[in-house]
Amino acid sequence: MTDTNQRAKGGPHYAYAIVAACIAITCLPCALILSCAGIFFTPVSEFFGVPKATFTLYFSILNLAMMVALPVSGKFMGKCDLRALLSGCVALCGAGCIGMGFCQQMWQFYVCGGVMGIGLAPLLYLAIPTLINAWFVKRVGFFVGLCMAFTGIGGVIFNPVGTALIAGGAESWRVAYMVFGVIILVGTLPFTLLVIRNTPADKGLLPFGATQAPDAASPVGSTARAVEPVNDTTSGLTLAQALHSPAFFAVLAFSGLITLNQNIYQFLPSYASSFADSLPAVAAASGVVASACMGGQAVGKVLLGIINDRSVRAGICLGVGAGIAGMTLMWLVPGQIALLLTGAFLFGIAYAMTTVQTPLLTRTVFGGADYTNIYSKITMVGALMGTVSAVAWSFIVDSAGGYPLMFMMGYVLLASCGALALYALAWKHGHVAT
């Protein structure tokens, strides 16, 4: 059945089922493991009587595992049935999360973190842009942004659930981990096993938004042929060609620096708390500051997706501009709580660039011919930066420069990201022109 025939019968395009599967992936395994991690830091470290840094080392190991798994995942995603690959990844995430509930020693948490990192690598970084790019010709940016927004929305939904479970007793964190693991398996595997398909051709369809036109060389009444879609997955550079281009290293640096900038978010609540003596009302709003940033992230992912469908340059300018404006409001007028929260919200839009702007920029610059291999290499730097950024920002915040130095470095990072992205787009334009 073709895309046109399916539309004529009034049925929704199967691409919407792919979107639902992508939302399940981001809202459950990605959100439960990443966006809800913080609620476990205090109860687990207190139960074992260790510093938080000792326990949260598992999170660094998780990020390192993602970095190592990404290039391997990129190669497999272009060659195998995504139902099997993504289902295996979900199984690793669920098993690792359930395993966290049974851990009796710190090294066991580290092993579980590594297992979850291997599973999360393709789910967080590769699955959504790969599937959306394959199934959609139109509104690619919007659907990538929509799906990725559920990493934050899932955190909003499940953080209170996990907190309530943990409140049950000294070891109730074990129950919370196990419940989260079961939710990951039960809520996601039906989608990855039964819904996911690599390409529309696997269902006898054209991508959503592709049109058909009669072949001029064919007799009247013959089967229509598909017009080549704008979002072509067969054109573009190979990995080897991309590796020899300066644009590859520009996008690579963009991925690392935007991830480093994103992790300023973790220090916004402590920044607000630092005003406990001079501005107690601001310190009391520290939790709300984090929520405002998460709200900006969720809205920003969808907004950036919509704008990127019209202009990738405009998306870059919006993300960078919102981040700079947000930090300015938080730094210069923290006493005005409304402006402080507005600044946190705007910074959330810049935060959203990590998982929305990076894949869309990669696709725009290098095309779709070898997208998963190229993007998996680019995201390795982002994953690596995720392992060191919290420590790096901790040193900066605790230095003589403190939070002002943090914001000044944030300006430099965002400006650098904007320059790198615009350079890559300019290189693409010149490359095509020649």
Image (spheres, rainbow, N blue to C red):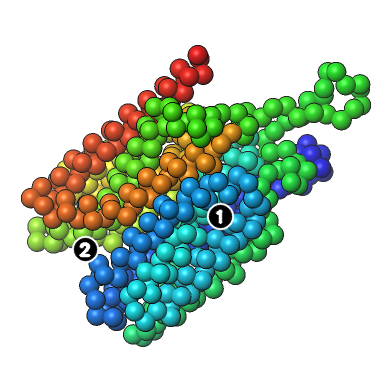
Of residues 242 and 133, the one nearer the viewer is: 242
| Total tally of numbered discs in the picture | 2
Residue that numbered label 1 is attached to: 23
Examine the rendering and report whether any part of residue 99 can be seen: yes
Q: Residue at x 24, y 76 (%)?
A: 50
Q: Residue at x 45, y 42 (%)?
A: 377
Q: Residue at x 33, y 35 (%)?
A: 417
Of residues 381 and 350, the one nearer the viewer is: 381
Whether tag 2 and tag 1 are in contact, CB under 8 A, the answer is: no
Q: Quadrant of residue 52?
A: bottom left
Q: Mark 1 or mark 2, which is nearer the start of the sequence?
A: 1
- Where's residue 100, x and y in %? 42, 74
Disc 1 element: helix
- Where's residue 259, x and y in %? 34, 46
Residue furthest out toward the top: 434
Residue that numbered label 2 is attached to: 284
> Does 192 appear above or below 179?
above
User: Which residue type carries mark 1?
Assistant: Ile
CA separation, marks 2 and 1? 34 Å
> Does 254 appear above or below 404?
above
Could you tell whether 394 is left or right of 257 in the image?
left
Could you tell whether 343 is left or right of 242 in the image?
left
- Where's residue 395, x and y in %? 17, 54
User: Which residue type carries mark 2?
Assistant: Ala
Q: Residue at x 48, y 75 (%)?
A: 98
Q: Quadrant of residue 225?
A: top right
